[in-house]
Amino acid sequence: MNTVAPQAAYAARDYKSDVKPVWCPGCGDYSVLSAFTKAFAELGLPPERIAVISGIGCSSRIPAYTNTYGFHGIHGRALALATGLKVARPDLSVFVAGGDGDGFSIGGNHFLHACRRNIDLTYVVMDNRVYGMTKGQPSPTTEPDWDSALSPGGTGLRPFNPLVIALASGANFIARGFSGDPNACAQLIVEAARHPGFSFVEIMSPCVTFRPDQRNWKEMVHDAPVTATADAAKAARRLMTDDGFNLGVLYKGDRAPYQPELKESASIADLEKAFQT
Amino acid sequence: MSGIKKLLETIKTAEDFRACAYALEAEAVERYTELADQMEVHNNREVASLFRRMAEIEALHVKRVKGDGAKPAKTNTMYRWLGSDSVEAIQPTDLHYLMTPHHALSLALKGEENAAAMFEALAAQATDPEIKALANEMAEEEREHVKLVKAWLAKYPEPDEDWHDDPDPPTITE
Amino acid sequence: MDKTSRPSISVVLAGSGGAGVMTAGNMLLDAAARAGYYGLMTRSSGPQIRGGEAAALLRISAFPVSCHDDKFDLMVAVDWENVQRFAEEIPLDAASLIVADPASGEMPQAIAAKGARHATVPLKDLAKKAGGRPNMVALGLVAALIGLPESIVIEVIAKSLKKGDPKTLAASETAIRSGLATAPTLGWREPLIPPSAKTGTRWTISGNHAAGLGAIKGGIRFVAAYPITPASEMLEWMAPALRKVGGTLVQAEDELASINMAIGGSYGGVPSLTATSGPGLALMSEAFGLAIASETPIVVVNVMRGGPSTGIPTKSEQTDLNMAVYGFHGDAPHLVVAPLSVADCQFATQWAVRLAERTQAPAIVLSDQNLGQARAIVDRPPDVAIGGGRVVEAKPGVGFARYAVTPDGISPMSLPGTPGGQYTADGLEHSPRGTPSSQAKDHTAQLDKRARKLEGFDYGDHWAEIEGDGDVAVITWGSTTAPVKEAIARARAQGLRIRLIALRLIAPTQPAKLAAALAGVSRALIVEQSHGAQFHKYLRAHYELPDQVDVLARPGPILFKPSDIVSRLMNGGRA
């Protein structure tokens, strides 16, 4: 993680742009935006050294609301955009944001490989177990019995467990937060950003419009009764028996991040010589 | 409130207390401003201006706290103190785009009551007399706010049951 | 019998299963280069990964050549396993000579039917006696038959095997010498005229490698790619080459990731590229649109192959033209550049990089398998001063607008890390400041700007290669340019006056320039390798053509021979 020694402090509001969010009042993403800006302030990063990359969906609108560099890319491809940016510009602090549909459905393949590559990025997924922007279809994390227009009676499909998938694919830091506690989420993002390699933070972020049943999430979340482990097997057992509402840092690995050295050792004329007769 | 214990552990001097109070009030201003923006974006003008008024009131409070010499938080670890039961800040999930002034003021009232209770508890548990005095001062100010909001709320009776009915379905925007 | 020396000769080496004809072919080309000749080599192979039937097709010449001749003069078959697969690619006639190993059995009917002369040489036997391999015997034999000096052939084998076992080298040399010794017994010799005096540097290079070099010369320092035939060799060359010049190549999980990674790298200010073929470009279309809308420059090298769908991966065609020009949703102006020869792969790619960077637009380089996988001996292309480079705002002031509407349509770009220049790049339509907008005035302003920056750009003379004069013009593009050029040279030798117009810039179109090039031309012949005549239809849609237009459009996998085009020209446009 690129940390600049916290000099004269930045305040959270220094990272907010003047674009007003259009999320439904009541949306958990407001708290996540707040968490991001607080985290940036805590990390002491100049806004111009941060890039927030997203795909498509309600959560993916976040870059426009921050005063950092950013890219609002196409559906499911945020991690690829971010990978290219970070490898080419290792001096930047790169954050990736998106929802459960963008990240685990169309973006699923890139999620696997981003974890595997272990590039120094922080990926925050605002999981509301629904496709909000397109008016309420099931997502890969939706419960099997949730009724919807596209899947009447529920999909009957077992939902993904993104934390297990992240662990199996090689993510180096895995945590879960709840948008109801933005300050705790800020702390998770700070810790994720400071931990080298690919850090994955799932933030349960209720959708007030299409999942009003998620109002009870604030009763269901609870601090995980464990401390972060660096033991992948232990973490696997933990995550496979997770109830989906354990909050905190659940895994902190020690794999070295992927970052090729960008160093010149030859000239173009040298490259040409190989072709000379 | 376990939050109080945590808070007290970090407040060692009057200066610390002022810094904490400043942070709390500043957060409240920001939160009410954001809520006002949200309501404005969703064309709920009445509640938007109500939240802006609340933001102005809190801003006055901030000025007063600052006037006492409270500096902005030394480090951003200040935010950790605030916890999920951060007193004056309304939970985003309590909002609805069609909420009425009655709802908005009920929430604001809860926030002010929480704030008053928190400062009262701080005052009760503090041992340092200066901190005790400051906490009591803050508590008194919050109680004033409670009165103000209650009077305001009295002007808006509870709305009909169908207050959140919207005949139009949601729109896809992207 | 000794024939008169000739300027150019074409040779095929065929064989299978470990016979090593590709190795022998490459060495023959290298020997020709060392001896001061020009030439090229293409390859054909069966679908097996190893042990399959293979043919190395070479042309060696005292003067520069860019395509195969109408027929092959000499064919040496190490064995006959499945070689009939290549029958349609190996034109032979009564003057051609086929040399085969009698131990290999009967010549396939498809080859025998061509009426060439036969001779036999016990290649395997000679190889065994030498302790070497039959392909080395064949190499020596061919070298002697076409007049390459023995010393040079020995030099080439020594260089190529110097890191290995000295015994292998000695055995190979013996095998070569026994092949050389056998040549006089055949009573057939077609020596090349001595090569012209060598001036300047020459390269032996493939189109894919030339494209890689051109990319790096243009400034590319980040590549993200997914392997696909026939583009992989470009990536394989670029991976270590990039590292040497301070860049890097990331192998992505698929083409969707590749192009998005390239966009990410470019957004960060590092010129970025990906390379693929038709099926991959199809996957990239959505992200290509993102590059257009967000005005992020990238280069996508598309080495075309037989289509549609999986098609014919190892053969060439010019049928991704439609997709390259039209395959993106929305009004999506962008750049399409197509190299005209193996050597031109360097310039075309370098130019595409500079254009993309300058105009902040994505560029497709339409190469093809014929160019990409052919190895040619060429004069080192001259360095061309190409301007360009990104317009960067290093000190954004208050009110900086990333997508500001400017007279030339190009807005200064702030790079991440620059204070005050923060913006969110977006595929959504946006205002000049970059805020998403669905307003008519913003959409019109940005569409105008994105079109204007490309249409108004000065592409100079590089847009096409135009030469010669006459009332007949041949209009072509890409790899068909080489046989067209040779055909035109022959037609001119017979008194015809013909103008060549070979387009290098496919998009945006240049109507005024083509009109000028067609001044005085009353008849045009359009030559392309496409069943659906994509290039003809493209020209019709966007350009004024002369009243008489003849179209010579054929699909892959067989390449045009110069004689195919000559007969069309000589018959006044009748097939």
Image: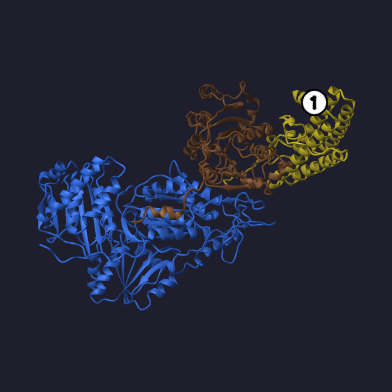
Q: Which chain is brown?
A: A
Which chain is assigned blue?
C
Where does the image place residue A6, in percent across and percent down from the top left? Answer: 70, 39
Q: In front here: C192 or B36?
A: C192
Q: Residue shown at 68%/44% (left/top)?
A: A15
Is residue C93 shown to the viewer in this render? yes
Left or right: C20 in relation to C515: left
- Is C555 placed above or below A129 here? below
The spot of residue C267 in percent (x, y) is 55, 51
The residue that mark 1 highlights is B8
Q: Nearer the viewer, residue C357 or C188?
A: C188
| Quarter of the image that includes the N terminus of chain A | top right
Dot 1 falls on which chain?
Answer: B
Which color has been applied to chain B in this rendered view?
yellow
Q: Residue furthest bottom?
A: C520
Q: How is the image coloured?
A: by chain
Residue B130 appears in which quarter of the rendering?
top right
Residue C446, position in %: x, y? 57, 60
Foreground of the two, A211 or C459: C459
Q: Is residue C331 visible?
A: no
SS type, badge 1: helix
Q: Is A140 placed left or right of C12 in the picture? A: right
